[in-house]
Image (cartoon, rainbow, N blue to C red):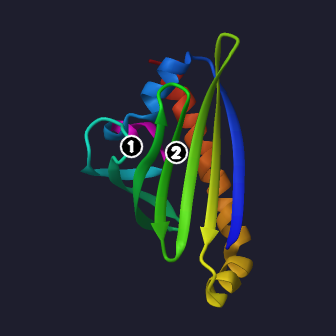
Amino acid sequence: MASNEIRLTQHVAASPAKVWAVLTDLDNAQQTLSGVSRVERVSGEGYAAGTRWRETRKMFGREATEEMWVAEVEPERRTVVKAHSSGTDYTTAFTLVSAGEGTDLTMVFSAETGSSLLLKIMMKLFGGIGMKATTKAMTQDLRDIATRAENN
């Protein structure tokens, strides 16, 4: 399997509890995250392992919708969200660490493609472009989460 990973950290001038509340508020995600145009809950209530939703974002000039689910939850400390699309497994882990008067929020995104030759070639050809766009979107998501947590 081919794998790519992005790791970003944003300091948030808010407690881990406030950051967690924003991070896990799926029903208001489209108001928090400027890159998200729509969120549709598929199953589950609140935020717990197994909760599923469809998230629509604009990428490369067009809207794309992916179904995502919560894979792991350690309240106010860590959560893992997963998705699967076009032969690729996506994992996003968020870790919250108390830092002085605030919180360091770290987001680690990884994409693992299947073992087919076509998928490997596609990742080689387009992986860099995709990872650059994903890094930009992740950076904005972290800023948006910080802004909401700091202003609540």
Identify which residue, 35 or 40, lies in the foreground. Answer: 40
Q: CA distance from mark 2 to mark 1?
A: 9 Å
Q: Is residue 77 left or right of residue 126?
A: left
Image quarter of residue 111: bottom right
Q: Is residue 30 left or right of residue 85?
A: left
x%, y% of residue 74?
49, 31
- Check contact, mark 2 vs mark 1: CB within 8 A: no
Tell me which segment is drawn in magenta: 28-34
The residue depicted at 58 percent of the width and 39 percent of the height is: 94
Q: Amino acid at mark 2?
A: Val
Any mark on residue 80, and which? 2
Assign a secondary structure to mark 1: loop
Image quarter of residue 142: top right
Outermost top residue? 101
The residue depicted at 47 percent of the width and 60 percent of the height is: 83
Name the quarter where the C terminus is drawn.
top left
Residue ID for mark 1: 49
Main secondary-structure element of the magenta-colored stretch: helix
The residue depicted at 67 percent of the width and 73 percent of the height is: 1
